[in-house]
Image: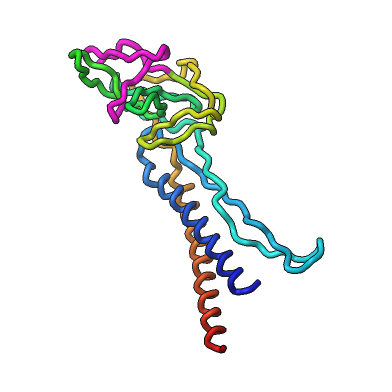
Amino acid sequence: MNLFTSLYTASAGAIAQQQGLDVTANNAANVSTQGFRPDRASFSDLVHTGVRAGEDAPKTGSGEKLAGTETLYVPAGGLRQTGRKLDYALTDGRQFFAVRTADGIRYTRSGSFAASAATNGRFYLTDAQGGLVLDRQGRTIEVTDEHPARAPGAFTFRNLDGLRKTGDNYFAPTALSGAAATAPDAGLRQGYLEDSGVDLADVMADLIQQERAFQLNTRMVQMSDEVAQTVDNLR
C-alpha cells in the first residue's frame, strides 16, 4: 500500500465514522424527546483493489462509507402516565398520529397535545408545533373544557422504512412507504405519553466504538502525512 492509498483509505474511514457519530449524537440529544424513534448507522466497504494481477492475489481496501441510516420503529417506547386528557400514546410501534401542518400532513409518535384557539373562537387539538391533530377520518378535533370531542386517529404504512424524517419529530410519506392507512385504535392510550425510544446504554456503546474508530483513522492520516514529509525531505 503506497502512502497516498493509506492516506485516502484512512480519510474515507474518518469521514464515515464522523457521519456515524453525527447520527449517534442526534440519538443522544433526543433521549428525552417524547415518541422519538432513534436511527442506526450502517457502514459498507469501498472498492477492494488487487495488489497484483491474478484471481488469488491479495487485495487492499479503499476504506469505508456510511451506507445509510435505519430508523428503529419497534418496539414502542415505555409509557408514562400523565393523567392529562389531552395526552395520548400509541402502544403499537408501527402506528403514528396525523398532524396537519403548513407543509402538509405529517406523522408523529409524540402525543403531547394541547388545546389551541382558532380564528372562529373554538379550541382544537394541536401538537407542540401548533399543527392540527386529525382523527381517523382526517378531521380536526374540537376541544371543550380540556376534553377532546374525538380521539386522534392511528395510522400506519405498508413500508415504514420508506418514511422520511422532516424534523420536529415528524415523518413524511414517500412513494416507498406508500400512503397512510387507518389502523386499529385498540393501542391508543389516553392520559399517557410515550418515552423516547433511545436506549442510553446502546448510545454510549455506539459512541465509544465510533469514536475509537474515528481516532484510529485520523491517527493513520497523521502517520501517512508524517511519512510522506519524511520521504519528501530525503529527496
Name of the residue lying farthest toward the bottom: 234
Question: Could you say where residue 66 lies in the image, as x and y percent from the top left?
Answer: 54, 51
Q: Which residue occupies 54% across, 79% down?
A: 228
In this rendering, the count of numbered labels is: 0
Q: Is residue 233 visible?
A: yes
Identify which residue, 207 or 131, lies in the foreground: 131
Q: Residue at image x 20%, y 19%?
A: 117
Location of residue 229 in the rendering, given as x and y in whole percent from the top left corner: 51, 81
Identify the residue at the far front of this view: 235
Question: Is the residue 115 above or below the residue 204 in the image?
Answer: above
Q: Main secondary structure of the magenta part?
A: loop
- Please check the rendered image and state whether residue 60 is part of the magenta-colored stretch, yes or no: no
User: Horizontal placement of 205 versus 62: left or right?
Assistant: left
Highlighted magenta segment, given as a residue range: 127-153
Q: Residue at x 62, y 61 (%)?
A: 62
Quadrant containing the C terminus is bottom right
Q: Position of residue 141 (x, y in %)?
A: 31, 14
**Residue drawn at the location 41% of the way across and 12% of the way down:** 137
- Residue 83 visible somewhere in the drawing: no
Please give left or right for residue 231 compared with residue 147 in the image.
right
In the image shown, does 47 or 218 lie closer to the viewer? 47
Position of the N terminus, as image quadrant, is: bottom right
User: Does residue 102 lie above or below 205 as drawn?
Assistant: above
In this rendering, the answer to whether 170 lies above or below 191 is: below
What is the x, y in percent for residue 35?
A: 40, 32
**Residue 150 forms part of the magenta stretch:** yes
